[in-house]
Image (tube, rainbow, N blue to C red):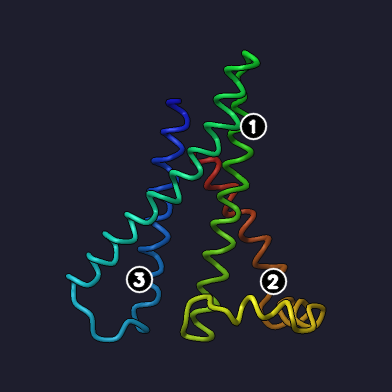
Amino acid sequence: MKKDFKLFIFVWLYLNLLRVISLITMKSYAGDINLNDILLTIYYGARISLKTAGVLMLFTFIFVTLIGWLINKHLDKLRLGLSAVFLFILNFLFVAKYFYYREFHTNFNEMVFNAVNDDVKALFYTMIDQYHLLEGTVIIILFTAIVVYIY
């Protein structure tokens, strides 16, 4: 249980760090905002991140801690593996959202989901060619490994 809580705190702080990075690197898109707006953004974002971190804690609690208690084994490697997968997904979505916003000046919307109706093969090659999907994925994997190592 203690390790699940540690993971919860780590993921919550990490999500807040990603939010601050977004705010700093995207400040030119924000327009005329003041310190109060920035603090409110961080505050409400931190509250939303509590839910995201809580889902991960619940997931690892059910599939690692409870099962470990039932079979009387420590499944710390499984917890680390699940955490690494979750952090990879978070990093991937962060990077995808970052570049999507820089390109289209909006967050993900229904247009992303309508892409499945387009030529998926052409979209895939475009993402590899113009948006450097392979290089970005390698960087995300390396960054995730560093974050997991810190955890």
Secondary element at tag 3: helix
Give residue 33's mark.
none
Residue at 48 percent of width and 38 percent of height:
57
Residue 23 spot, x, y in % from top left: 35, 70
Residue at 53 percent of width and 71 percent of height:
97
Residue to which mark 3 is pinned:
24
Question: Relative to 81, does residue 125 appear above or below in the rendering?
Answer: below
Determine crowd level at label 2: few under 14, some 14-19, many 20+ residues with C-alpha closer than 10 A.
Answer: some
Mark 3 and mark 1 in contact (Cβ < 8 Å)?
no
Residue at 76 percent of width and 76 percent of height:
124
Upstream in the sequence, badge 2 or badge 1?
A: 1
Mark 1 and mark 2 in contact (Cβ < 8 Å)?
no
Residue to which mark 2 is pinned:
133
Type of amino acid at the residue the image marks with label 2: Leu
Determine crowd level at label 3: few under 14, some 14-19, many 20+ residues with C-alpha closer than 10 A.
Answer: few
Type of amino acid at the residue the image marks with label 3: Ile
Residue 75 spot, x, y in % from top left: 62, 24
Secondary element at tag 1: helix
Which marked residue is nearer to the observer: mark 1 or mark 3?
1
Q: Is residue 104 left or right of residue 14?
A: right
